[in-house]
Amino acid sequence: MEAIGEYLSSLSLSGLLSRIPAGVSQGLIWALMAIGVYITFRILDIADLSVDGTFSTGGAVTAILIIAGVPPIVAVIIAFFCGLLAGIVTGLLHTRLGIPAILAGILTQYALYSINLAIMGFKANTAISADNYNLVVSGRNVTLAIFISLAFVVAIIAALYWFFGTERGMSVRATGCNPQMSKAQGININLNKVIGLAISNGLVALSGSLFAQYSGFADVNSGRGAIVIGLAAVIIGEVIGDALLGKRMNFAFRMVFIAIGGIIYYLIYTLVLWLKMDPNMMKLFTAVIVAICLAAPYLKKVRKNSFRRAGKNSAGGRKDA
Amino acid sequence: MLEVINVCKTFDPGTVNEKKALTGVSLKIEEGDFVTVIGGNGAGKSTLLNAIAGVWPVDEGTITIDGVDVTGIPDFKRAAYIGRVFQDPMTGTASALGIDENLALAERRGHSRRLVWGISSKQRAFYKERLSELNLGLEDRISSKVGVLSGGQRQAVTLLMATLQRPKILLLDEHTAALDPKTAATVLETTEKIVNRDHLTTLMITHNMHDAIVHGNRLIMMNNGNIILDIRGEDKKKLTIKDLLNEFEKASGEEFANDKAILS
């Protein structure tokens, strides 16, 4: 009893409140990654695991470039293009060499671990202190970080809304939805898959770049489990969006809600830390939530249409007869 | 317009599942011909259409469309010449996209996909006009996702997509087989209307002998991967189902084994 009392009294509400802004700014940075995951997972219907590697790539490239004297904003753009390149590799492994998409992603991710280490001169992490460099975002100034990361999120959503409304973007959406129809309409689905994977990984690397600057260091392990966190944000966002908007949910709203999903995920993370739970347990916690959310639609369907139910109905019918 | 010369295709060669699906098929179709294709299960009807569409490369032979040798061109590039409607209504449209978006995708068939906004208001008005010709009320819900449409509505939209920009050849693979009889009749009527209006060169597979006789100006029957019967012009107009069955037995030495084709 005493221990619980002591635990509760050690939690301070003001402590939680003071952490919320940091949670929001980190959530906004992760939201960019979540939108990237959305492009592959929902639009292309591919679970792309390369993102765990590209997130770290974004950070590693950024850290090394900034240390070399490149302006941080330029480093962010270069990180984006490095992610783009990694996505193209996954795409070519899948479309040109016939490797299943999920394995192609795993291979890229695996290779990127070595590449990321090599980028950072075979050190597991590289510091980029806000004291020495004029970073784009930094955890030192959370309010500014919120505004800047929000600006990135808004700009990316606007750009994607435009792209997926163009002739090319529409054909990418069709590719993920119905490859056979796409081919019959003259769409090069292999090219489109590569385009989608490239954009997705570019965004993830962009997110990794901002995250490294926010944290003040790039870490080769920072992207571990990024795909799961991205999925969590996508799912949280979709659940909330569907509940609030229902049928009015369009493409732009969907991306906005995914960004909100990213923020909510990070606020939950903040709450878990505040409750003094071991942050290492967060991965288990996230995995369970994502598993439940991914399983829900399937279980709902099974409940409506199951052999068990048919068996029950049949047994009931016999009794009546 | 379309020339198929001695085309062969064997699936799973060298295995126990080896299937000689096309055994040296030759077929020449003139501009504006509306050819109906009938035959039993496994006769090679769909395989012939897939060979023309370029779903996979053929083992032997040549396929030319409007004088262009397309034998070495994959399906998505061949799509520039070909409009297709499939048996499964789910296959021909993208369910997560709007009716207008599906039509816009179809309108760019055979052209590059540019980085310009996909649908202009002018295009949308044009789509509305074309949709209203289907008499399904779809023009009033042009932004609806195709996924909420019925099978018949989706087939009608697919038909519109296949013909929105004039294809050199229209391939219909039992496109009414999955629909209820009333919807099937409507879709077939629409097909006839569009094909006649645009003078489309058409190949239509059907399991229904009556439809095969009533529609088109030429009828071919397939068996064991080849064409065993080719009737056109005045001969086709006088054709009856009984004639067809007799001809089939004469040509193949077998009895026609597809009750569905005879009874419906």
Image (cartoon, grey):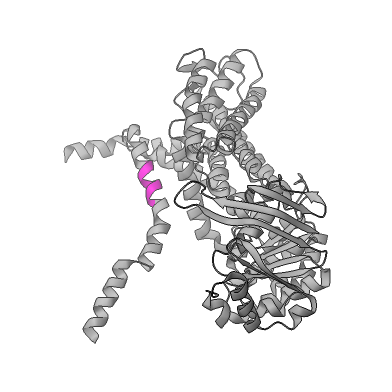
Q: Which residues are magenta?
A: A286-292
Q: Give the image quarter of residue B53.
A: bottom right
The vertical placement of A32 against A289, above or below, is above
**Residue plotted at (81% across, 64% down):** B30
Compared to residue B12, the image places residue B140 above or below, namely below
In the image, residue B1 lies at what x, y percent? Answer: 81, 59
The one of B12 and B25 positioned closer to us in this rendering: B25
Q: Residue B152 at x, y = what percent? A: 62, 73
Q: Is residue B169 above or below residue B191?
A: above
Q: Is residue B107 left or right of residue A17?
A: right
Quadrant in the picture for the N terminus of chain A: top left
Residue A113 placement (x, y as % from top left): 47, 23
In percent of the image, x 25 and y 79: which residue is there?
A316
The image shows residue A106, relative to residue B203, as above or below, that is above
Q: Position of residue B4 (x, y in %)?
A: 73, 56
Specify whether residue A211 is painted magenta: no
Report if residue B150 is visible in the image.
no
Left or right of residue B111: residue A59: left
Q: Quadrant of the C terminus of chain A?
A: bottom left
- Taking the image as drawn, is residue A235 in sight? yes
Chief secondary structure of the magenta portion: helix
